[in-house]
Image (spheres, rainbow, N blue to C red):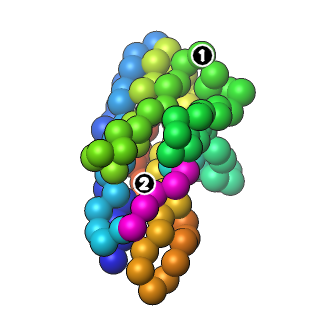
Amino acid sequence: QVQLVESGGGLVQPGGSLRLSCSVAGSILSIGDMGWYRQAPGKERDLVATITSGGSTNYADSVKGRFTISRDNAKNTVYLQMNSLKPEDTAVYYCKAVVRVLMRGTYDSWGQGTQVTVSS
């Protein structure tokens, strides 16, 4: 069974920073693309940033220049460094990993979500 365990959310003032982490645990053969998504109250879940196994990144326009996604393949972990946070960044943040496992093949696995609140 594959689990994605997220950490690092919390309450921060506008202009502040937070770093999210997401580790993939379980019997996996490989991990492909990893990414962060967020869902604000009453809104759909949107892409924040993605990173390939080779390190190529993609960002939503709203976070370019403020957020940085990275990964440590040896630790099966993806990070999201969030700087210059704004109230509109408030949301539940979810990580996703494309995992390949025995018997089941390749599929998207999601974390449980971590709350990020930007408020003074």
Per the image, the residue denoted by label 1 is 65
Name the amino acid type tagged 2: Gly
> What percent of the width, then of the height, locates residue 114?
39, 48
Question: Quarter of the image containing the N terminus?
Answer: bottom left
Seen from the viewer's position, the closer of residues 65 and 70 is 70
Task: Indicate the secondary structure of the residue bearing disc 1.
Answer: loop
User: Which of marks 2 and 1 precedes in the sequence?
Assistant: 1
Q: Is residue 46 left or right of residue 93?
A: right
Label 2 sits on residue? 113
Magenta segment's dominant SS is strand
The image shows residue 109 at horizontal and vertical percentages of 48, 65
Asked whether, in this view, residue 65 is left or right of residue 85, the answer is: right
Neighbours of disc 1 within 10 Å: few (<14), some (14-19), many (20+): few
| 77 to 59, vertically: above or below | below
Q: Residue at x 49, y 83 (%)?
A: 104
Badge 1 amino acid: Gly
- Separation of residues labelled 1 and 2 (CA atoms): 23 Å
The magenta stretch is 29-33
Q: Residue at 64%, 44% (x, y): give it.
A: 47
Query: Which mark is in front, 1 or 2?
Result: 1
The secondary structure type at the circle numbered 2 is loop
At x 63%, y 52%, the residue is 45
